[in-house]
Image (tube, grey):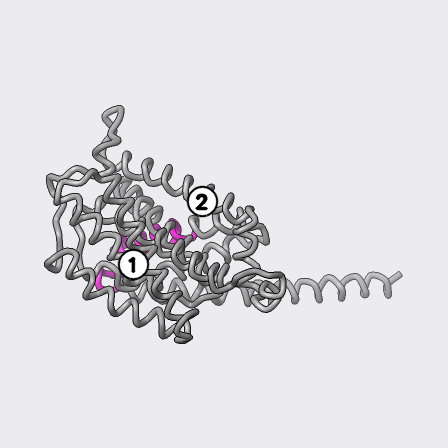
Amino acid sequence: MSLIASLGAIEIGLIFGLVALGVFLSFRIINFPDLTVDGSFPLGGAVAATLIVAGWNPFAATAVSMVAGGLAGYLTAWLNVRLRIMQLLASILVMIALYSVNLRVMGKPNVALINDATVFSLVEFGGLPDYWLKPLVLLAVVIAAKVLIDLFFASEVGLAMRATGSNPRMARAQGISTDRLTVWGLALSNALVALAGALFVQSQGGADISMGIGTIVIGLAAVIIGETILPARSLIVTTLACILGAVLYRFFIALALNSDFIGLKAQDLNLVTAVLVGLALLVPSYKRKLASLWSRLRIHSTSSVKEAR
C-alpha cells in the first residue's frame, strides 16, 4: 500500500475516531443502544456543507453542525425518558426521520464542496500537501476532543453520568437526575458524531445523503477492536483505545482492499467489516481460554516438580 493510501486511511480513521468516542459514550458510559448516529453523522455533514456553500465560515458551519447533532441526540433521549419509548425504538425513529431532514437541509441528494473553503484550507501552513495536512489537523482535533472528554468525565457531572450508566438505581438513590444526564449524554454523543460528519464532508469534498449508512457498525467495530487490543480499566486509556481502534479498522480495510492477491473490491467493504468485527469479538474469549489453559499447565508443572522432589 502506498504512502498516500496509508495517510488516507489514517485520515478517515481519525474522523471515525470521533464517531467511536461518541458511540463509546452512548453504549459504554450511558448504557444506551443508540442508532441515531446513522442519521446524525450525515446530518452534521449536510449542515456543514450547506452552510459552507451558502458562504458561511467553515468553523462556524462546523460548530452549527455539532449543535444540530446534539439536538438529534436530545430528541432520541427525550422520546425515551419523557414518552417512555424503548431505547432502541426511539433511536430508530429519530434515525429514520433524519433521512428526510437531511434531504431538506441539502435540498438535493448531494452537495459538492469543490472550490469552497474548508477548515483544512484555512489552516494551511508550511506548504504541506493535503495528504499530510489533513491527517495532522484531524489528529489535533481528535486529541483535543479526547482530552476534553477525559476532563469532563473526571468532573462531578461526568462522574454522575458514569454512575447513571453503570447503576441507575443507585444513582437515583444518591439524588442524581438520571433522566437529565441521559439527555445530556446522548446530546454530547451525537454532537461528536456530527462533528465527525462535518469534517468528513470537508475532507472528501462533498456531502451525500447515503454517507451515514453503516456508521453505527463502524463505531462499534472501532470500540470493540480498541478494547480488544488495549484493554484497561482507566477511562483515559479506554478513550485512547477507541481512537486507535478506529484508525486500525480503517487501515485494515484499506490494506485488504488494496491487496490485489486477495481479490477484494470496494463492494466487499461490508463483508470485510463483518469479518473484522467478528474476529474482534472472538479474540477476548480465546484470550481467556488461553490464559486458563496456561494457568492449568503451570499448576500441573508445579505439582509434577513437587512430586518429583
Magenta residues span 245-268
Nearer-N-terminus badge (2/1): 1
Relative to 114, 198 lies left or right:
right
| Residue 90: x %, y % from top left | 36, 71
- Please indicate, yes or no, whether residue 143 appears anywhere in the rendered image: yes
The image position of residue 195, as x and y in percent, is 31, 49
Q: Is 103 rendered above or below residue 58?
A: below
- The one nearer the camera, 278 or 154, is 154
Measure the C-alpha gap from mark 2 to mark 1: 20 Å
In the image, which disc is placed on residue 28?
A: none
Q: Nearer the viewer, residue 76 or 117?
A: 76
The residue located at (19%, 66%) in the rendering is: 100
**Neighbour class for label 2 at 10 Å: few (<14), some, many (≥20)?**
many
Assess disc 1: are there few (<14), some (14-19) or many (≥20) residues with their C-alpha within 10 Å of its C-alpha: many
Helix, strand or loop for disc 1: helix
Judged by its main secondary structure, the magenta piece is helix
Quadrant position of residue 293: bottom right
- Which is more foreground, mark 2 or mark 1? 1
Q: Position of residue 60 (x, y in %)?
A: 25, 41
Residue farthest toward the right in the current orientation of the protein = 309
Q: Return the mark for residue 146.
A: 2
Magenta-colored stretch includes residue 232: no
Which residue is drawn at the image coordinates 24% and 57% (left, top)?
Answer: 42
Tag on residue 40? Answer: 1
Left or right placement of residue 98 versus residue 82 in this view: left
* Residue lying at 43% horizontally and 48% vertically, measured from the top left: 244
- Please check the rendered image and state whether residue 265 is part of the magenta-colored stretch, yes or no: yes
Residue type of the residue flagged with mark 1: Ser
